[in-house]
Image (cartoon, rainbow, N blue to C red):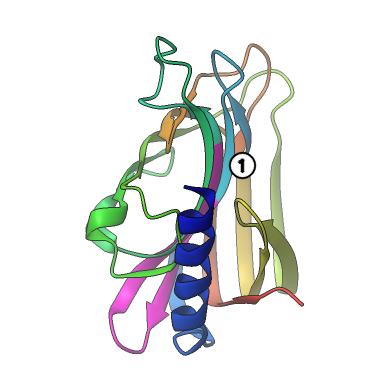
Amino acid sequence: MLERVALLTLVALASAVAQFGDYSLTGSIPSARLDYGTGPDSSYAYGQINTVSHPQFGEVVDVYWYACGFQPPGTTTQRQYRCESVGGLAPMSAVRTRGDRRIELNIHTETMLLLYYWSGTPSAWTGEFAMYDGANSYAEESTGSKTRTQVVPIYPSGAIEYRYSLTGKSTTRSSIFTGTVGPALIEAPYFGANGSLSVIQGRVSTRTVPAP
């Protein structure tokens, strides 16, 4: 099974290289980030969504997640604990903005427009980001240019380098995500937030490439 997962990952990476490029978008651009979400039975996940413009698909959601937990989420009867990495482009219909305080996700690998990498098993990221302004919350605004580079692990081996840059005004506030990320069931933390919500007024560029 591990050999099949590794082969699928390598095939996905090989095909994705030709698709990688600098995707950009200008306007009012929402994004959300799950820093580290946890749930019952040692399940955990992290990930991010960004709204981008793709030369072939137009305005889409650039998404990745890494999650570990029991499959199906929340059950432990057969003790099938597994981890997965998923990255790619999802249609805008998979993300719904509820005012300026909530974002709902309904992202499924079967309906994604392009997969950079995945385990070969159908998966989904569903749930809600809700802005959090209680104890230990935060809010920040910045104007100008900013660049961030992340190296995202791919299960069972390898990594992807995720480059993200913006020019304009960015507003970021703490949030709480609850829902399901792949095999992980994520609950609200006992204290504080587990993610963030951002709105950017300006231009955003993203690029995803195999890590060196």
Task: Tell me which residue sits at (54%, 75%) in the image.
Answer: 202
Q: Is residue 32 left or right of residue 140?
A: left
Counting from the top left corner in percent of width and height, residue 152 is at: 67, 58
- From what the image shows, is residue 111 above or below residue 162? above
Counting from the top left corner in percent of width and height, residue 128 is at: 39, 34
- From what the image shows, is residue 74 above or below residue 60? above
Q: Is residue 96 left or right of residue 42?
A: left
Q: Main secondary structure of the magenta part?
A: strand
Counting from the top left corner in percent of width and height, residue 177 is at: 49, 31
Q: Where is the C terminus found, in terms of image quarters?
A: bottom right
The answer to whether residue 63 is magenta is yes
Mark 1, residue position: 173
Counting from the top left corner in percent of width and height, residue 184 is at: 48, 29
- From what the image shows, is residue 63 above or below residue 71? below
- From what the image shows, is residue 173 above or below residue 177? below
Stretch in magenta: 48-67
Amino acid type of disc 1? Arg
Q: Residues within 10 Å of mark 1 (few under 14, many from 20)?
A: many
Task: Tell me which residue sits at (48%, 55%) in the image.
Answer: 5
